[in-house]
Amino acid sequence: MMAVEVHPGPAFRAEAPKPLFTGAGTYANSYDVARDGKRFLMIKPATAAQAPSDQLTVVLTRFDELRRRVPVAK
């Protein structure tokens, strides 16, 4: 993934593209951008050194738990 610094204005100008981050691995379409545009969430592919996981955690009461932890004043 690359980043480009842009200079908007009457004469639009864009700098040369630069790598946004470094590191081995391909993430393909396994990422999302935070709302603030400053962070990424990426799913890193498993490597041969990692043991396969046969466990999946499913949270069914996500919003109930959130309401309990972060009460909102009415």
Image (spheres, grey):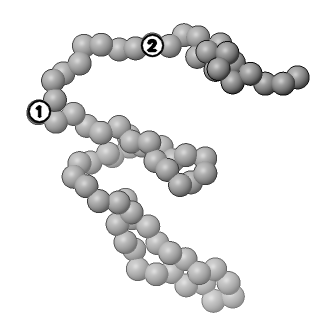
Percent of width and height locating residue 15: 46, 81
Q: Residue at x 69, y 18 (%)?
A: 67
Distance Cα–Cα, label 1 vs label 2: 26 Å
Q: Which quarter of the figure is the N terminus placed in? A: bottom left
Q: Which quarter of the figure is the C terminus placed in? A: top right
Question: Counting other residues with Cα less than 10 Å from the Cα at mark 1, is it few (<14), some (14-19), or many (20 or more)?
Answer: few
Toward the left, the furthest residue is 48
Residue 63 visible somewhere in the drawing: no
User: Mark 1: which amino acid?
Assistant: Ala
Say if 4 sits above or below 7 in the image. above
| Location of mark 1 (residue) | 49
The image quarter containing residue 47 is top left
Residue 49 visible somewhere in the drawing: yes
Say if 26 sits above or below 46 in the image. below
Image marks 1 and 2: residues in contact by CB distance under 8 Å: no
Percent of width and height locating residue 73: 84, 24
Question: Counting other residues with Cα less than 10 Å from the Cα at mark 2, is it few (<14), some (14-19), or many (20 or more)?
Answer: few
Label ID, residue 11: none
Q: Is residue 11 left or right of residue 53?
A: right
User: Mark 2: which amino acid?
Assistant: Val
Disc 1 is placed on an element classified as loop
Q: Residue at x 11, y 33 (%)?
A: 48
| Location of mark 2 (residue) | 58
Disc 2 is placed on an element classified as loop
The numbered mark, 1 or 2, whose residue comes first in the sequence reads 1
Q: Residue at x 16, y 29 (%)?
A: 50
